[in-house]
Amino acid sequence: MSTASDLQTPDDIRRLVETFYTAVRPDPQIGHFFTELDWDHHIPRIVSFWSMVLFGDRSYTGDPMTAHQRLHQRIPMERTHFDRWLALWTTTVDQLFSGPKAEEAKDRARTIAAVMAHRVIGG
């Protein structure tokens, strides 16, 4: 059994998101999708997004589907890219946290990856 605590606060989500992107940026499969991001803008938005998803926080505003569809027009995505994103997310959650919210973070990510893949690339 892990001694890691569960996701409980926005600070926990920030730690998860920052650690996740530390793994994503150099990743040979999906890192190239993230090279042009303004990280000072992106990280707080993603923290806000996951705070909404996991804690019901209402501060997030945005349209992640449209953003990913536009990215796909510039840099084509494949199902394997969504699978890799999910694998890195799951590994990061498991490295840092354990408990019901951590499991929910992985479950929600599975759903998000499937919906994004379907809506962005049709698969």
Image: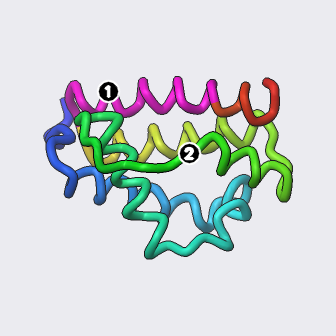
Near-viewer residue (72 or 16): 72
**Amino acid at circle 1:** Glu
Residues at marks 1 and 2, CA–CA distance in whole angstroms: 24 Å
Q: Quadrant of residue 27?
A: bottom right
Q: Is residue 5 left or right of residue 113?
A: left
**Quadrant the N terminus occupies:** top left
* Magenta span of residues: 98-115
Q: Is residue 7 left or right of residue 117?
A: left
Give the residue at x 45% y 38%. Answer: 90
Q: Which mark is residue 40?
A: none
Where residue 56 appears, x then y in whole percent?
Answer: 25, 34
Near-viewer residue (86 or 60): 60
| Residue on which disc 1 sits | 103
Give the residue at x 67% y 73%. Answer: 36
**Amino acid at circle 2:** Asp
Q: Is residue 10 above or below residue 112?
A: below
Q: Is residue 67 above or below residue 6?
A: below
The chief SS type of the magenta part is helix
Where residue 76 appears, x then y in whole percent?
Answer: 85, 49
Q: Quadrant of residue 32?
A: bottom right
Element at badge 1?
helix
Q: Is residue 89 above or below residue 75?
A: above
Circle 1 Cα neighbour tier, 10 Å, few/some/many (<14 / 14–19 / ≥20): some
Q: Is residue 82 left or right of residue 72?
A: left
Element at badge 2?
loop
| Residue on which disc 2 sits | 63
Foreground disc of the pair 1, 2: 2
Q: Are marks 1 and 2 in contact (CB under 8 Å)?
A: no
Circle 2 Cα neighbour tier, 10 Å, few/some/many (<14 / 14–19 / ≥20): few
Give the residue at x 25% y 41%. Answer: 57
Where residue 31 appears, x then y in whole percent?
Answer: 67, 62
Question: Mark 2 or mark 1, which is nearer the start of the sequence?
Answer: 2
